[in-house]
Amino acid sequence: MAEFPPFAVTVDLVVLTVRADELCILLVRRGVPPYQDRWALPGGFVGFDEDLPDAAARELTEETGVPEPIGHLEQLGTYGSPKRDPRGRVVTVAYLALLPDLPPPVAGTDAAAADWLPVSRIADAQLAFDHDVILADGLERARAKLEYTPLATAFCPPEFTIARLRTVYETVWGSRLDPRNFHRKVTSTPGFVAAAGRVTEGDRGRPAQLFRRGPAELLHPPMLRPSVARS
Amino acid sequence: MAEFPPFAVTVDLVVLTVRADELCILLVRRGVPPYQDRWALPGGFVGFDEDLPDAAARELTEETGVPEPIGHLEQLGTYGSPKRDPRGRVVTVAYLALLPDLPPPVAGTDAAAADWLPVSRIADAQLAFDHDVILADGLERARAKLEYTPLATAFCPPEFTIARLRTVYETVWGSRLDPRNFHRKVTSTPGFVAAAGRVTEGDRGRPAQLFRRGPAELLHPPMLRPSVARS
DNA sequence: ATCTTTTTTCGTCCTACTGACGATAACCAC
DNA sequence: GTGGTTATCGTCAGTAGGACGAAAAAAGAT
């Protein structure tokens, strides 16, 4: 391997959570050029002896301050247009993280600030680099995966009610779901959720049963989003 | 961007086709170390001014000799373990290609040979580098995508019969499907296929209508593989 | 020419899933 | 208690899908 073009490799994170009935993303405000003072996805260079998932998990921990075996982390895609970074040839491996609601993040080393922003408030071409595209891909991935995996539970604390799970679906999909049909669907899909044996207390209305995530990796049959109107 | 670890970036291709009722993959026999004389995925270095999809399309054309606007090409995932290549730190972006049956490939520049191999004959740890893992991921992606996209048509010539499309599903999924229910399902799913207005001739049995791929990108409702037995 | 085989294509029955929505249960505030 | 709110259970009709019968349209055998 005598000659090869030298690339820089980074990881970038699309970190999503549901808070206050809004789908939010963790962004950092860049403190240095290029794109200084613009919002960007958290991320950084991959260490020379570091595996890609390790680098993503490290960045996630650094930005959220939370030890990472919480929520869900998966590779989203790789973006490597020659012009995407004015500093040189940078290929970035994007990861998608789904987390339960967390306390506000702390600003990192080279970031002026870090915060949760509602994705509904992020207009096109507002983010640094090609991060708009990466965010759009991450949102579409998350929306699609809620259909056929139990990943909506990654947005919830370890024990949650069916209603909480329903607000996750409603928030991510942006549409309302019938509470009675949703309840029937979730509890009748094998392995989706398992009863925790306890109930909520102190809220309004009838106390709700608490559930944990079940063992299923795939939902059969899948949840169907109402937006895909049928023929 | 003064200092950053220097990486090499490559693309590797999982190229699948259906020929003679078998799911086959395009492999090259390595002519140089490491892993000399082992089968490997076709691929190569990304040019310094080359975008990743362009590099993948270029490699695909080089290996198959076919101008590339045929079939389907999508990014599969990125593999970058520090130990995956003994020559140094190489991050590879894997692409998945689905093609109709093509003539045998020509051996490339640094490959001793290239050929279609049935995936059923590829045992574990037979391929160079981590290409076993990449192949496994590509197969799972292809199997899953046949469920909810019209991508099975990428394995077919421009005009095809429902029976041909059915053998694609049966070959990729490894299970038999009822011809009558399959016919009903395909023709009743909006946008999956469109009648070409012509029929086959010269075969055994009743002549079949020819179809082209329809405009749909997603199948609603999806095709369901029988392997996922229900509760 | 007629029969058999093969393959396509249409139709029927039955069950499972889903959307719309009524009804009841169990809490809180007053 | 009453009223408000939320959770949970049921009912009913429409639809999709698996199992399978049957007719249609060709090729080949006799």
Image: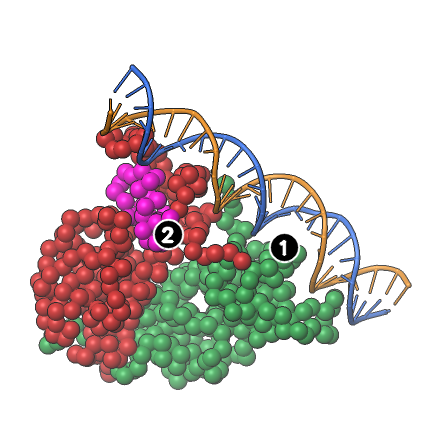
Chain colours: A green, B red, C blue, D orange
Residue A79 location, quadrant: bottom left
Residue A181's mark? 1
Viewer-nearest of discs 1 and 2: 2
Q: Are marks 1 and 2 on the same chain?
A: no
Q: Which SS type dominates the magenta stretch?
A: helix
**Is A23 placed left or right of B69 in the picture?**
right
- Percent x, y for residue A228? 50, 49
Question: Is B102 or A37 nearer to us in this picture?
Answer: B102
Specify start and end residues of the magenta stretch as a single range. B150-176
Pointer 2 chain: B
Question: Looking at the image, which is closer to me, B108 or B207?
Answer: B207
Q: Which residue is depicted at the point 35% across and 49% down? A: B169
SS type, badge 2: loop
Residue B171 appears left or right of A150 = left
The spot of residue D3 in percent (x, y) is 84, 59
Locate residue A155 relative to residue B146 in the image: left or right.
right
Residue type, label 2: Ser
**Quadrant of the snapshot with the N terminus of chain B:** bottom left
The structure residue drawn at horizontal position 36% and vertical position 76%, both measured from the top left corner, is A53
Instruction: Check disc 2 and report the residue beneath it.
Output: B175
Q: Residues within 10 Å of mark 1 (few under 14, many from 20)?
A: few
Mark yes or no: residue B212 visible.
no
